[in-house]
Image: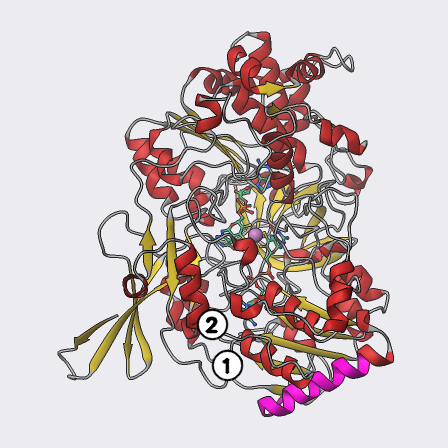
Amino acid sequence: MNTTDTKDTGSEVKVINTFCAAHCGGDCLIKCYVKDGVLIKVETDTGPEPQVRGCLKGRAAREYVYSPERILYPMKRAGERGDGKWKRITWDEALDKIAAEIVRVRDTYRPVAVLMLPGQGDVQILHRSPNLMTRLANMIGLEGTGFTTQPNWEFKYSWNITSYGQGVAASQYTYGTFHTANNRADLVNTKLMILWGWDPAGMVHGPNTTWYMAQARERGAKIIAVDPKHSDTAATFADRWIPIYPGTDAAALIAMAYVMIDEDIYDKKFIEKYTVGFDKYKDYVMGKEDGVPKTPQWAVEITGMSAEDIVWLAREYATIKPAAFMAGIAPGRTAYGEQYHRAAITLACMTGNVGISGGDAAGRAWESVWPGILYPLHPIDDTLGEGLTGPLPEKYQKIVDERPKRETPTPQKPPLHANQLPDVMNMGIFKMMFANAAPSLSMWPHANRILEAIDQFEFIAIMEQFPTPFCQYADILLPATTFFERNDVGWGTGAPFVGKINKVIEPLGEARNFIDVAADLARRFGADDYCTKTEEEMLRQFAKDAKIPDWDEFCRAGIYHYPQDEPEVVFKAQIEDPENNPFPTPSGKIEIYSETIANWELPNFPPIPKYIETWESRNDPLVGKYPLQLTTPHFKRRQLSKQDTTPWLREVQKQVVRINTKDAEERGIKHGDEVRVFNDRGEVFIPARVTERIMPGVVEIPFGAWYHPGKGGVTLKENANFLTNVPNSPSGGMAYNTALVQVEKIT
Ligand SMILES: Nc1nc2c(c(=O)[nH]1)N[C@H]1C(S)=C(S)[C@@H](COP(=O)(O)OP(=O)(O)OC[C@H]3O[C@@H](n4cnc5c(=O)[nH]c(N)nc54)[C@H](O)[C@@H]3O)O[C@H]1N2
Ligand SMILES: Nc1nc2c(c(=O)[nH]1)N[C@H]1C(S)=C(S)[C@@H](COP(=O)(O)OP(=O)(O)OC[C@H]3O[C@@H](n4cnc5c(=O)[nH]c(N)nc54)[C@H](O)[C@@H]3O)O[C@H]1N2
Ligand SMILES: [Mo]
C-alpha cells in the first residue's frame, strides 16, 4: 500500500491495489484511492506490461459500493411479502430469529425442510458461499438429507454447471479433462480465429483477451464470427460475420467435417496418431451409418448458413495454420449443446490444431487454467481454509460420511439438479429458506416457478448486498459486504497470475462477511469451531500453497504474475511426446468415439458427435404460435445481474430486445417501441431495438435485468428468464438459449 499527500488538502490519501472479484473473468487490477476511510477514486493497472486493465464495470465501483440502494442493516419485513417495507433490527435479533426458525422447521418437519441456498456471487477463494454454507449446514444438522444445499456449481461435486455444463462434459469425455485452453496470450500467434458464439468484447473471457486479439489482427490474422448476432466482437474484429440459427451449430460443424473428408483436406496423421473412433464419425458424416450424407446442402435448411459459406469456412479452417477455433459456451448453453462442443473438438483434431501454439483445442473457450492446473495455484477444490475444516459434531458427521458422492456430471446419479429446485420448492418440501448471494429470479430458467413457490415458505432469510427482486419476498434481510470490504484471493482466467483482494474500506453500515455470520449461527447451535483461524492466517496459507514468494509484496501489488518464458499451450506434451504423455481418457487418446458415453446408452447423448434437433426448434409445431427463437446472452455493462442498477453503467447500454428489421416490419414494430415478448411460460415488457445486427427469426434479450426505473421501483418486467425453458441437456447443462417466443407491439 502506498501513501501519498494530496496537494489540495494536505490530508493523507492511501493507494490500495485490489483485485476485481467480479464474475466476468476480467480479473483486473483496481487501484483505489482512499481518503479518511472513503474510496474517492478508482483507477486501474498503470504498471509494466502485461497490465491487467479494468473495464467499465470495475471503474464504476464507487457508484456500486456507495449506492444508496445497498442493504446496510439487518431488517425484518414490515408489510406483506413483496411490499418492500422494512424495519431495522439488530444482528442479534436477526440471527436469534433465523436460528429459532431453523430449529423449529428442522424439528417440526425434518432437516430437509430447511433449504440452505448459496450462490456464487463474486469469484474468490475464501468467501465462497457454497462451501461456507455447506459447512454451516453440516454443523447444524441439516446436511446429508438430499435437498438441503443447492448443488455446488463446480464440476467435481455438482449436478449442474450453469455456465458451461455441456462444454465441460464434452471436453471431459473427449479429452479426459476440461482444461482445454491455451493461455490467452498465445492468441497473438494465430493466423485464423473462428469466433463461434464468442463475444469477448462484451463478455471479457479472461484478462486482456481483446488486446491479444488486436495484436493477432495487426499481425495479419483473419477473424471470422459465427453467431446469430453481429456481436460487438464481430463488429470490432471480424473480417466476416456468418449468422446461424441458435442450437444448430453441430449441424454446421458436421457439414464442415463432410467438406474436409470429401475434399481430402483433413489431417489424417493427426487423427491416426492421437484419436480414437474417427471411422465411426466418418461413417455418420458421410451417410454410411444412416443413409444421410451430412453435406453442406443438408445443413443449409437447419442452420440458415449458405452451402458456399460452409464450404468456404471448412476450407479456410483446414488450410490456414495455426488456427484457433474459439468455441464459445453460449452455443453449448442449448439443448444437446454437448454435440456442438464435441463436433468442434473433432474439427480441431481434423485440422491438427490441438497442442500447438496459435492453435486451440476448441474445448470450451473459457477459463481453462482455472483452478490452476497449468500453474501452481492452490487447487480450488480445497478452498476451505484450514481454519474451516475442523470436525463436525459427531452425530452429523456420520450422515455426511454416508451421503452418496457424485464424481462426474453423468446423469446416472443425480441427487437433485439445481434446475429442479424451483419445482421441488413448489412441492412444498421446503418450509424455510436461508439464502446467501442467492441465485435469484433473474438467474433461473422459467423464473415464474419461484414466484409461484414463495408461499410454500413459512420463513425466508436472505443475505445480500442489494435489495434484488428476490429480496422483496424475504422475512429477514442481512447486509453483506462487497469485496472492497474484505480480504481474499482471486486468479487470472486463462492467464498465469493470482490476485490479492485487499480490503479497501471498512464494511459499510453493519454489513458483514458470511463467514462471521455463519460462525455466529453455528455458535447458537453449540458449535464454537465453525472457523478457527483468521482471514489473514487462511489467506497466507493459500499464498504459500500457491507458491507466491512474498506475501507483503503480493498485498502491496494486488497481483502476482508467475514467471513464464512463453504462454502455456495445453496438450503440448501429449502432442510432442504421446508415448510418455497419454491423454487422460480411458484409451489415452482423444475420444471422438467415447466408450464411456456409449455405456450410458442415452438416446440423446450418442458416443460420436451428432446433430440432434433441439426442442422448441424452428421445426417445432409450436412455431405456429411462437415463431421466433430467443437467445438470452450475458450483458456487457452488468456482471450477470450485478450492477444492473449502477447509473453510470445504465447510461452505457439499454436493456432491449433485439429484433431484425424484417421481423419488426411484419409486426408493425419501430425502433424504440415498447413490445411484449411472450410464450406459455411468461412475458417480458421491453423496448425494441430494430436492427440488422441480429438475424431474421431470432430475437435476443440479455439475461440478468431486474430493475426498471420510473415504474414504481423494482420490477421484473425485463427479465429474460420468464421466457426460458427448464429441461436440461443430457449432460446436465442448462439450455438457456433454447426457447420460442412471439413479439407484439404494445398498443
Ligand atoms: N460483461 C460481462 N461479462 C461476463 C458476464 C457478464 O454477465 N457480463 N458473465 C460471465 C459469465 S458467468 C459467463 S458464464 C460468461 C458467458 O459468456 P458467453 O456464454 O460467451 O456469453 P453470451 O453473451 O451469453 O454469448 C456469447 C455469444 O454467443 C451467441 N450465441 C447465443 N446462442 C448461440 C447459438 O446457439 N449459437 C451460436 N453460434 N452463437 C450463439 C450470442 O449471440 C453472443 O454473441 O461471460 C462472463 N463474462
Ligand atoms: N437466461 C439466462 N439465464 C442465465 C444465463 C444465461 O446465459 N441466460 N447464464 C447463467 C450463468 S452462466 C450464471 S453464472 C448465472 C449467475 O446467476 P447468479 O448466481 O444469480 O449471479 P449474480 O447476479 O452474480 O449473483 C447473485 C446475487 O449475489 C449477490 N452477491 C454477490 N456477491 C455477494 C456476496 O459476497 N455476498 C452476498 N450475500 N451476496 C452477494 C449479488 O448482489 C446478486 O444479487 O446465471 C445463469 N442464468
Ligand atoms: Mo456463468
Position in image of residue 498 (x %, y %)? 38, 54
Residue 482 disc label? 2
Identity of the amino acid at label 1? Ala
Give neighbour class at mark 2: few <14, some 14-19, many 20+ (Cα, 10 Å): many
In this view, which residue lies farthest toward the left? 7
- When the figure is inspected, residue 657 is found, relative to residue 339, above or below; the finding is below
For the magenta stretch, what is the residue range? 86-105
Q: Quadrant of residue 343?
A: top right
The N terminus appears in which quarter of the rendering?
A: bottom left
Q: In the image, is 142 to the left or to the right of 585?
A: right
Kindly identify which residue carries mark 1. Answer: 511
In the rendered picture of this protein, how many numbered marks are placed on residues? 2
Residue 422 disc label? none
Position in image of residue 266 (x %, y %)? 53, 13
Q: Residue at x 52, y 66 (%)?
A: 386
- When the figure is inspected, residue 80 is found, relative to residue 305, above or below; the finding is below
- Magenta stretch holds residue 93: yes
Position in image of residue 482 (x %, y %)? 47, 72
> Which of disc 1 and disc 2 is earlier in sequence?
2
- Residue in the foreground of this view, choosing between 76 and 202: 76
The response on whether ligand 2 sits within 8 Å of label 2 is: yes
Residue 240 is at least partly visible in this image? no
